[in-house]
Image: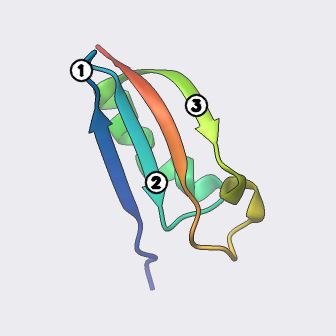
């Protein structure tokens, strides 16, 4: 059964996009968003939250990234 993951995007007044992945942990955080990140532009910064390191057993992880538009 596929796991449910939510991706939240916030676009700042300066055009910077912040991406947050909810419902994934470990590598699932980054693989969930890799294709859309390529379409949006270059990843400027990446902050992996503690849930990223907890493994696949925990499904409450989040990840935030800032993207620079192409």
Q: Is residue 31 left or right of residue 12?
A: right
Give the mark, 1 or 3, whose residue is nearer the N terminus: 1
Question: Percent position (x, y) of residue 38?
Answer: 37, 29
Question: Percent position (x, y) of residue 32?
Answer: 45, 53
Question: Percent position (x, y) of residue 54?
Answer: 76, 64
Mark number for residue 63?
Answer: none
Q: How are the colours assigned in the image?
A: rainbow
Question: Could you classify mark 1 by the number of other residues whose Cα lies within 10 Å: few (under 14), some (14-19), or many (20 or more)?
Answer: few
Question: Could you classify mark 3 by the number of other residues whose Cα lies within 10 Å: few (under 14), some (14-19), or many (20 or more)?
Answer: few
Who's the residue at 67% across and 59% down the image?
51
| Residue 36 quadrant | top left
Which residue is identified by label 2?
21
Who's the residue at 51% across and 41% down the image?
64
Which residue is identified by label 3?
46
Give the mark, 1 or 2, whose residue is nearer the N terminus: 1
Which residue is identified by label 1?
13
Q: Is there CB contact under 8 Å for labels 1 and 3?
A: no
Helix, strand or loop at mark 1 = loop
From this viewpoint, which residue is outermost toward the front? 13
Give the mark, 3 or 2, whose residue is nearer the N terminus: 2
Measured Cα–Cα span from mark 1 to mark 2 = 21 Å
């Amino acid at each position: 059964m596929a796991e449910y993951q939510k991706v939240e995007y916030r676009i700042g007044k300066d055009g910077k996009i912040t991406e947050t992945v909810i419902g994934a942990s470990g590598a699932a955080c980054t693989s969930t968003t890799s294709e859309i990140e390529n379409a949006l532009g270059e990843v400027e910064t990446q902050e992996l939250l503690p849930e990223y390191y907890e493994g696949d057993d925990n499904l409450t992880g989040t990840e935030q990234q800032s993207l620079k538009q192409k």
